[in-house]
Amino acid sequence: GPADAPADGWDATSDDAFAHAQAVIPGGVNSPVRAFGSVGGTPRFIASASGPYLTDVDGREYVDLVMSWGPALLGHARPEVVAAVQEAAARGLGFGAPTTTEVELVDEIRRRVPAAERVRLVSTGTEAAMTAVRLARGATGRDTVIKFAGCYHGHVDGLLASAGSGVATLALPGSAGVTAATAAETIVLPYNDLDAVEAAFAEHGDTIAAVITEAAPANMGVVPPLPGFNAGLRRITAEHGALLVQDEVLTGFRVGPGGWWGLEGSVEGWAPDLLMFGKVVGGGLPVAAVAGRADVMDLLAPLGPVYQAGTLSGNPVATAAGLATLRLADADAYAHVDAASTYLRRAVAGALVEAGVPHALQWAGNLFSIVFGEQAAAEGARDYAAVQASEHWRYAPFFHALLDAGVYAPPSAFEAWFVSAAHDEAALGRVVEALPAAARAAAEARPP
Ligand code: PLP
């Protein structure tokens, strides 16, 4: 078998590290997108990060536009957050008993999102989704869940189902290892299509426990909800006695102080029954949450019959990171992230126009992504089918031109770009300098 990595420090290049990792970890990575599968090439092994920059084990520095896939809202290794983590760690890494930090974090969540009447902390967004679905079933006594094609809610069996196109498709398993029985409990519908939701409820209404949706989808690239779509989901679920679960794992505390709900539901005067948070809420350490209506949340054990638990839930070091992050994420921080995102989005669009690449820059709050192709340029992409039909093969050469110039964009066309409060003029300027060559590479790309 492969030689083991040396015990005391390992001075490997990314190439060496990946070669060895592939022999001992499936695909060499602990989460698939990190493997650079859709863009090709060797993933960079990261040695450290600071503010808007990543440094790999080969000593190269990159402007980071992934930011740990969202958590690093304030930039990497923000000193106040690191200090809070160090202080918490020095008091003990975990007790399996309650701490006041957990309660402070929950109060901070509730202050920002009043619909979070009760909050249960978990460690990952996947757990939050699993708990939200179990709660919805426990609350309604129904089994079926509606999700939307292209929305990601973690690797929960029943939510891995993706869709064929069309209306009210009964899902096939989206992953090997998901039983047919589990897949049959999920109805996958096209995003942004309220008629499809109405039709599914007309046919199956008395069996549907919940509609789960990304508050603003950013896992098929960014596909913003059409005006009235989320409010429509609220109305239809309420009419049929089903719960509305809004997944704010990615948008929560990133697109604004109150997440996507703060930009939409709070303005329109409605709230979902349950919400999910993750990413920013843990400031880079494993914290996520399921939250919502008190009467539903109080069905959780130990008060109610819906079981849920976790050795690491509400971990004191992780919650300290989340609390420090949220306390520093003030109006100025959000204004900076929004401005940096708008600036970058316009720069990307400008470079693509200059190179003659037809595209749509799609955005929701401070999240954006590129959809390539004439059709997207003409109409935008409002669902997963449109994104899949786009010229996404233009992304790999675009990505690699950026990477070669020291810019670490998401290694997939179907992911959002993330900026932070630490992305200053110097960092953004480096991206802008790298864009023309990347746009030309996208222009020269040919379909596979
Ligand atoms: N929900 C959304 C909207 C996400 O973006 C993600 C992760 O990317 C998840 C759920 C799953 O979270 P985790 O990766 O922490 O399990």
Image (cartoon, helix red, strand yellow):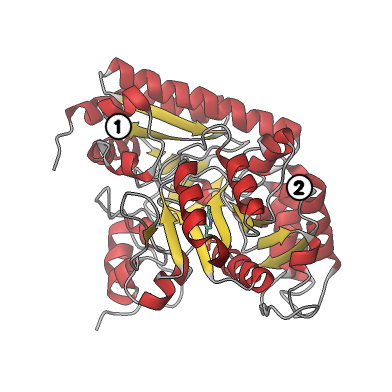
Which of the pair 211/315 is nearer the observer? 211
Q: Is residue 357 above or below residue 151?
A: above
- Residue 343 x/y as whole percent: 52, 23
Question: Quadrant where the C terminus lies?
Answer: top left
Crowd tier of the residue under label 2, counting other residues whose Cα lies within 10 Å: few below 14, some 14–19, many 20 or above:
many
Disc 1 target residue:
372
Which of the pair 244/44 is nearer the observer? 244
Q: Amino acid at mark 2?
A: Val
Tell me the element at label 2.
loop
Image position of 219 (left or right of 20):
right
Instruction: Report the residue at 59% width, 45% height from top.
Output: 251
The residue most toward the right is: 100
Image position of 3 (left or right of 201):
left
Is the CB of mark 1 within 8 Å of ligand 1?
Answer: no
Instruction: Report the residue at 21% width, 26% height from top.
Output: 443
Which of the pair 211/117 is nearer the observer? 211
Q: Is residue 25 above or below residue 326?
A: below
Disc 2 target residue:
113
Q: Is residue 153 visible?
A: no
- Residue 136 x/y as whole percent: 63, 67
Tell me the element at label 1.
strand
The residue most toward the front is: 202
Image position of 34 (left or right of 97):
left
Question: Quadrant where the N terminus lies?
Answer: bottom left
